[in-house]
Image (spheres, rainbow, N blue to C red):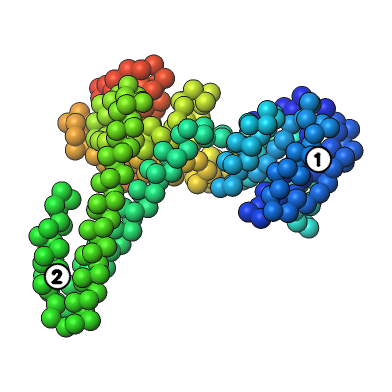
Amino acid sequence: MKYYTSLTEYNAGVDLHSRNLYLCLMDRAGKVLVHENIRGNDLDRLRQLIEPYHHDLTVTFESCFMGAWFADFCEDEGLAYVMAHAFYLRSIQGSKHKNDKRDSKELADCLRTNRIPPAYVCPRAIRPIRALLRRRMAFVRNRSKLLGFSMIDLMAHGLPTPQICSRSRTRWSAALRSAFDEPFQKAIAEANVTMVEHYNRQIDLMEQRLIRQASTEESLDFNLLRTISGVGEVLALTILYETIDVTRFPGVRDYVSYCRLAKGVEESGGKTLGTRGGKMGNPYLKWAFTEAACLAKRAHPAIAKYAGRLEKKKGAKKLVNAILAAKLARAAYFMLLHKTAFDPRRIAQEA
């Protein structure tokens, strides 16, 4: 685990909330100079409190969905700041008594003694693009639920289920609308179809905007990722905007671990007790590379042949997909780092 090293004389911890923030500011010796609850997130009051120490001050706050705007505030004010990885702040999580006042003091103390595990702050320009991509994925999940409900309704009444085509759902919509005669059941079917059609339009608009952005601003990386067997536009977008900057990872192992494709090992007394850390990292990248692993076997014969050999050796298809996903993540890392196209022969090589 890596820790941030603070070099300033004054260090501040901020416990963020939607309606207030608690500030604790202390000097290098640990003397508390400011400890106040700022209601309404009054930034003018915050500026007033930190003004005497602004020249030699570092601020820390926990990583949360509200941390982005505060990171922007620190950047605009010219403050040195570090976003603390909330999962690794064991000293705060392990406290017997926990409240905003204690948390802000503990944050400041951790920063002063170089015990802050830093988290990555997504660049301000990339943040809305990534948010749009994630919202698109949420809409796709919601649409899938509606499609599932519609199929269940048909099966529950002993009716045939129409085939769903990913490109055109007009036949499916017409079949579902005409499937029921009972008024209330017909109303349910009509509501499901209407919502699915609305999701289709919104998802298409989102995809067009994201593809246009990637093709214009990140065309090289976007096109390189699309050379990976089985990776289309949506998977390439996910890998591109969830990775953001591949140079922020010290090595390929760090990147694969961030993609949730490498689990940690728990050992004690010379015995291996199991694995841990399977949910540490980015779930969107894990989904993207897992999907890519399944599609790569269909897209390239050499990878399919290699997967067949792995399946004979390992047995479980799920384990084979995990190995392929990790290999594709390693390939994507070096492709983005060295600006090279995908070579399926290197994936298909035996280790």
Check disc 1 and report its element: helix, strand or loop.
Answer: helix
Instruction: Report the residue marked by disc 2.
Output: 177
Among numbered discs 1 and 2, the one appearing first in the sequence: 1
Using the rendered view, name the quadrant where residue 310 is placed. top left
Q: Nearer the viewer, residue 322 or 285?
A: 285
Counting from the top left corner in percent of width and height, residue 263 is at 49, 40
Q: Residue 168, relative to residue 261: is it above or below?
A: below
Report the side of 22 relative to 64 (left or right). right
Q: Residue 145, relative to residue 244: is it above or below?
A: below
Q: Which residue sits at x=17%, y=31%?
A: 301
Residue type at mark 2?
Answer: Arg
Residue type at mark 1?
Answer: Leu
Q: Nearer the viewer, mark 1 or mark 2?
A: 1
Q: Nearer the viewer, residue 109 or 343?
A: 109
**Is any atom of residue 312 visible in this view?**
no
Q: Which residue sits at x=72%, y=35%?
A: 59
Counting from the top left corner in percent of width and height, residue 51 is at 80, 34
Using the rendered view, name the quadrant where residue 218 is placed. top left
Instruction: Report the residue marked by disc 1.
Output: 49
Counting from the top left corner in percent of width and height, residue 161 is at 13, 67
Report the side of 47 relative to 278 (left or right). right
